[in-house]
Image: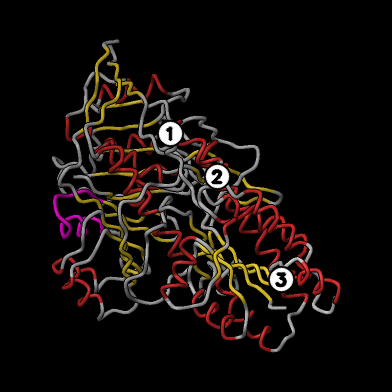
Amino acid sequence: MTKSALIHVENTEGILEFAEYLASAGWRILSANKTEELFKQKKIPVVHESSFSKSGIYVNEASLLIKDIIEVKSEDDENTYQKYNDYNKNYIKIVCLNVLPTLNKNLKKNQLKDAIKPVNFLITSILRNVISNYENLLILTDPADYKEAMIQLKTSHVTMEFKSYLAAKALNLISAYDAGIATSVLQSDIYKEKFMNYLTYPLKKDMVLHDGLNNHQEACIYKFPADTGVLNGITKAQGKEISYSIFSDVSLVWGLISTLFRNLKNQMSVKSINSDGYEFTTQFTPLTGTVCTIAVKLSLIVGASLSTNVIDSFRKTYSYDRENINDVVLGCSAVIDGTAAKEIVNCSFIAVVAPGFTDEAKEIFATNTNIRLIPTGKIEPSEYNGHFISNGLLLQTRDSSLFKKWNIKTKNRPSQNITDEMAFGTLLSLGARSYSALLLKNNRILTISQGCVSMKQAITNLIQEAPERTDENESVADILVADSPIPLCQSVMNLIELGVKAIIQPGGTPTDDEFIKYCDDHEVIMIFTNMTHIKN
């Protein structure tokens, strides 16, 4: 009796080598569709298996095929051999099937039927059923297992431990495939189910990292399929390997840049109300032709700026404590050219993430192997954030809205430049660890205080780190941005004395009225957003 191998794969990695071995060892290969075509192109003997037809009309044949496979017994069962000889059945001992889990949240109503019942649903149906007979089969779903399978087949000793391991991996694939279907449907615009009964995403192991945040920790990166999520599309172009902390910082920096341009690429507006009750619309200048750079270390923003070109934006960003802060991740919204690379390469950056790098820039960066180059394309930020807790996962929707409404509490209204700079500062507060406050001038961070235990402490830290005032007619900073309500305190008064022209904050402290009056008396603009941007 000739033993058969049933092969039908969407992931074709390594399948030709495996099929060639089976054919040379006398196995009969059953296949269909693109897998069958691939084998025929490579002159590998193959028999057409009609139950895999795309038309779906051969469901009965698939049922009979499943029945045959789950009835297969161990090789020393003479009755099994006789049964398969008598009925001329395929004695299938290897089931090599896989599918590629997908995630599509842009489903339309006319796509719903195909999404719930995709063309390749028979593949997972067969897998799900034949797992019940895993002790007598070799069930392969991962190309990484082909080599070990060939070794064990050559020695005619396929261990039960290997069979059970493969069966568990098959279940893992099936669950990921089903998760992609369920999540695509439930979280599409049709149903908009933000929090499903079971959190199921087809996250695929992409890379085992060298270590975790500390050397004694282990780490791995998982990615969503179909280019969703911040890290999909990000690859290392050159430099050393990417660590856990670098991945984390790259995710933060590129998520902020993506959020900024998603909000302000086109004309954005917000409903506003004056101190006298007059309602109007505040409009923000689109970021066309604008370059944003942000510097991050261990999830802390250490520098950021907006400018009209890469080199100027970088110079304005690279203004933090250079002597004491190193191994920083730099993110830039524009392609890095040679001019910028000449300055960046000599700085203490551990990675640079950007849409791309010119050939000249790559050559320059190649002289500093400590800097990883990470090119990335147009990527949408993840819709959620959270972290694992002792017995589960704490999850929330991502904070990606800059404001819903502006309440201009003072008599003075902001100019267009101040308005645009407030939007940029608010974006940075989305990524800063709370409680946070920052001072901006000319669309760059002068100083930032984050990770404090109170808003009052955050403001006090700004005073300690604020640059000295060299000209009484020149303000130290233009704008104060806070992610939480600011109480009127001596530190705020000191900042105003240093020339702060405008403050944007959520509002909502017992000292609000007194604070507003103080700002009016000192001709400082005060805007309440009624939105906190707390981040731990």
From this viewpoint, is residue 419 visible? yes
Q: Is the magenta stretch mostly helix, strand or loop?
A: helix
Closer to the N terminus: mark 1 or mark 2? 1
Residue 330 point in image, percent of width and height? 31, 61
Which quarter of the figure is the N terminus placed in? bottom right
Instruction: Quadrant for residue 22, please give it.
Output: bottom right
* Residue under the point 74% across and 57% down: 67
- The kind of residue tagged 1 is Lys
Let me know if residue 79 is in the magenta part.
no
Above or below: residue 49 compared with residue 264 = below
Q: Mark 3 points at which residue?
A: 91
Q: Which of 411 and 173 is in front in this view?
A: 173
Q: Which of 415 and 411 is in front in this view?
A: 415
Crowd class of label 2 (few under 14; some 14 to 19; many from 20; radius 10 Å): many
**Separation of disc 1 and disc 3 at Cα?**
43 Å
- The label number, if any, that marks residue 181 in the structure image: 2
- The label number, if any, that marks residue 51 in the structure image: none
Above or below: residue 147 compared with residue 301 = below
Q: Name the residue under label 1.
A: 108
Q: Nearer the viewer, mark 1 or mark 3?
A: 3
Above or below: residue 525 compared with residue 44 = above
Above or below: residue 453 compared with residue 147 = above
Q: Give the range drawn in magenta.
A: 305-317
Q: Tag 3, which secondary structure?
A: strand
Crowd class of label 1 (few under 14; some 14 to 19; many from 20; radius 10 Å): few
